[in-house]
Amino acid sequence: MQTEVAIIGAGPAGTTLGLMLHQAGIDCVVIERQSSDYVLGRIRAGVLEWTTVEILDSLGVGERMRAEGHVHSGVSIGWRGREILSIELQALSGRPMMAYGQTEVQTDLYRRADEVGLTIVFEATDVELHGLTGDVATDSPAVTFTADGGQQRIDCAAIAGCDGYHGVSRITIPDEVKTEYEKAYPFGWLGILSETPPLPQLMYVNNERGFALCSERNPMLSRYYVQCPLTDSVDDWSDDRFWTELLTRVPASAAETIVTGPSIEKSIAPLRSYVVEPMQWGNLYLAGDAAHIVPPTGAKGLNLAVADVRYLADAFIARAEGDQTKLARYSTTALSRVWNAVRFSWWLTMLLHRFPDQSPFDQRAQEQDLYYLASSRAAQESMAEQYVGLPLYPDLT
Ligand code: RFL
Ligand code: PHB
């Protein structure tokens, strides 16, 4: 088989890139290791930046999100048993954000892929990348895999590595040409889904017992998280223990209104920040979690994946029109936004969590950061601007 761009991974990054290229008339094939049901079963992101909302609209996948998603004009922060402030995102930044789960986004992307005839090969095993030399002039890229019981080969002009943190694409880049930046945090998030009505607004909580987050999926589906030690497993957390801990950490005014019920999903995610540079090597281009991981505190992972593929698709479109420069600069363009999100997610993680080795100095500095945020409009504006997402192509003039 022959195509222009072979896309590895049909998560949000790979499927969105496929739809963008297909819309622009650039031939592509998406190759996914799992079944579509498996990908849809992963409970992950819940918050979309407005930039992401607009990109999804432009691909014709925004209709259900607009009808069923919940537009939020603000998020609250709880501390010392009270709701200390509500960051009025819309008033401060001019844009709201959208609560719409990654499962729903992915469902809409797959549905659109079916409608427009984008080829996604699911359950492809033994995916291997070939013909990459690190030089766009000498590369002759190809992907081989096993699907439908047979070995298949796709020759292509470029490969987009959208295969997440554990994929094959990034490890194809030799160690001597890549630099990895990493920070692991000494805790995880225990998350549950429950068929109960959520709070009216997302609430992030810094409590002496640890971080908590109240979020939502729809009017009858809530998503809650509590910070937990990395050594814990879900078996350590009965529903009763989870609710008791959550209600202890959130401000009393919120605890009074939270409706508890049986969990229908429970999982623990470790928190880490990770970036690989550069995000391209010859005709291999990385996007999304394949190139970077952020802790979920800033709600940036899915949004960064969508922004990366917008830059990448724009660069492929420019190349099809004879301009090679955008593709040559893809990594530089994407990394600027990536590092903003990495820094923001790190800052919010440091602000809201309790660290096992937190010294009295760290503790006071964190308290001061919260006081400053609660008392300064400039600090709130800065947080709002970053939370709803910076412009894709900032005007620096
Ligand atoms: P994905 O979603 O991991 O998809 C990669 C796909 O590649 C496939 N794959 C392969 N396919 C072929 N061959 C191989 N060898 C392959 N290896 C892997 C995988 O099966 C998979 O289908 O990466 P992508 O597309 O870059 O998307 C990234 C997002 O999924 C991720 O950043 C977010 O979920 C992060 N995240 C959040 N992001 C937000 O923007 N807002 C949030 O509110 C938010 N909350 C979260 C989150 C992530 C969480 N966890 C569990 C890590 C909350 C949590 C708890
Ligand atoms: C979620 O709803 O899963 C969610 C919301 C906000 C975050 C992280 C996760 O910062």
Image: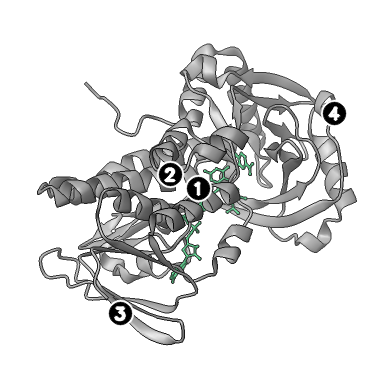
Residue type beneath disc 2: Leu
In depth, the one of 117 and 339 nearer the eye is 117
Q: Earlier in the sequence, mark 4 or mark 2?
A: 4
Callout 3: 10 Å neighbours few (<14), some, many (20+)? some
Cα separation, mark 4 vs mark 1, equals 31 Å
Q: Secondary structure at mark 3?
A: strand
Cα separation, mark 4 vs mark 2, equals 33 Å
Q: Check whether the beta carbons of the residues at disc 1 and disc 2 lie within 8 A of each other.
A: yes
Q: Which residue is mark 1?
A: 294
Cα separation, mark 3 vs mark 1, equals 33 Å
Work out whether 52 lies above or below 111. Answer: above
Q: Earlier in the sequence, mark 3 or mark 2?
A: 3
Q: Nearer the viewer, mark 3 or mark 4?
A: 3
Work out whether 85 lies above or below 338. Answer: above
* Mark 1 residue's CB less than 8 Å from ligand 1: yes
Cα separation, mark 3 vs mark 4, equals 56 Å
Work out whether 314 lies above or below 71. Answer: below
Q: Earlier in the sequence, mark 3 or mark 4?
A: 3
Q: Percent from the top left, x then y, of residue 76?
A: 66, 25
Question: Can the viewer see residue 10?
Answer: yes
Residue at 47% in and 61% down? 165
Callout 4: 10 Å neighbours few (<14), some, many (20+)? few
Residue at 31% in and 48% down? 23
